[in-house]
Amino acid sequence: MKKTFTAILSLALLISCNSEKSESTQDALEENTTVLAETPTVETGAAENPAFDISAIPVSTEDIGDFPFFTAPQGAQYINNVKPSDFDFIVFVTPESVYEVEGKTFRAHVHPDRSSETKVSGRFLTKSFEDAIIQAGGVKVFEGKLEGEQKETYKNLCTYSGTDGSIDIWNNPIATYVIRRNDGNVYIALDKGMASSTSIQIVQEKPFEQTITKITSDKIKQDLTEQGKSVLHINFDTDKATLKPDGKEVVSEIVKVLKDDPSLKIAINGYTDNAGNKAHNQGLSESRASAVKTEIAAAGIAPERLTSKGFGQDNPIADNSTEAGKAQNRRVELVKI
């Protein structure tokens, strides 16, 4: 009987110990499960493909010369006599974004030089540029064909499509690069799909600088005194002789000059650009000069102190082959009599 009790007691103790171990094990598992649930999830994809961040790129101190920094490779040339623009933009592509970059800009097609005996391929051209960019401390940001939303965004932003240096994103891959610089970061885009040519776009970031100054009576008086004439760009309605509000403001400054000097007499000469019919431009310039004279006289200046004449598209002061030049040629000149 004593042996039986001892066995039963031992069995009870064993069961009790196992039960306690089981509960202890279960508590530990629950505790570990809680800890694991509270550990943040690591986005491995974000680490493998980080978003473009120019501040993470080393600053290049290489001597890269003057803008646009790169000549055409041997046996090739930039065609159509392209020139840098002091302020424009290119559309830049990164793996996650498509956006504009503004600054000093150069866009050009690169074709084989017909006078060269060296035959060049598109692969040679793009590798030449890429190597030069890397040597200048640049890095590649993106390469590939644009699809879906990226392509649509590029199309909407690229208002210069079809001009010199345009990249055919509809058919070809695009490659983009950046050179981080203390004097302005340089962004570059290349067309990588053409057999014997390419297109390159370069922009060096710089802030916009306003060049328009308000026409004042003091400036008009100074020009008339020192040069005998003052060249003014007075705004009219398109293809009309109707002064716009800011055009009337300029006329009011002319009136101040004439009122300050009662002995001053001026000739008002009108000019146009060469767009359209020459006879029409002649008539338009005469009407605009006359409109300025009428506005001045209406402000109390004696008509005998004023003359007006139109010269049409003759005597341009700028290149009529560019929009900027045409804008300069659409003018009114005040000449001291």
Image (spheres, rainbow, N blue to C red):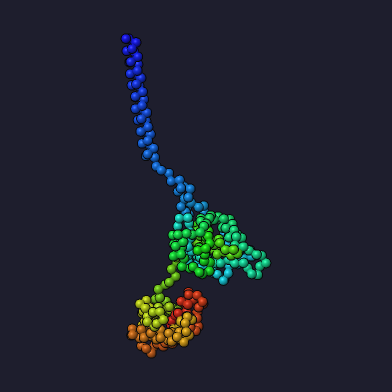
Q: Quadrant of residue 299?
A: bottom left
- Does residue 257 appear in this view? no
Q: x, y percentage for residue 252?
A: 36, 79
Q: Eyeballing the image, is 144 above or below 81? A: above
Residue at (40%, 79%) from the top-left corner? Answer: 238
Q: Farthest residue in the bottom direction?
A: 304
Specify whether 125 is left or right of 5: right
- Dividing the image into 4 quarters, which one contains the N terminus? top left
Is 204 situated left or right of 73 in this image? left
In the image, 278 versus 204, the foreground residue is 278
Q: Is residue 169 visible?
A: yes
Q: Farthest residue toward the top? A: 1
Who is closer to the viewer here, 209 or 74? Answer: 74
Q: Is residue 109 above or below residue 300?
A: above
Q: Residue furthest right?
A: 117
Does residue 248 appear to the left or right of 327 in the view shown? left
Q: Position of residue 35 (x, y in %)?
A: 37, 36
Look at 52% across and 63% down and name the residue there.
171
Residue ID at (37%, 35%): 33
Residue 4 lies, in percent from the top left, at: 33, 12
**Eyeballing the image, is 299 above or below 190?**
below
Residue 124 figure quarter: bottom right
Write the residue at 32% across / 9% down: 2
Percent across and percent down for residue 262 are 37, 85
Question: Can you say which quadrant of the picture contains the C terminus?
Answer: bottom left
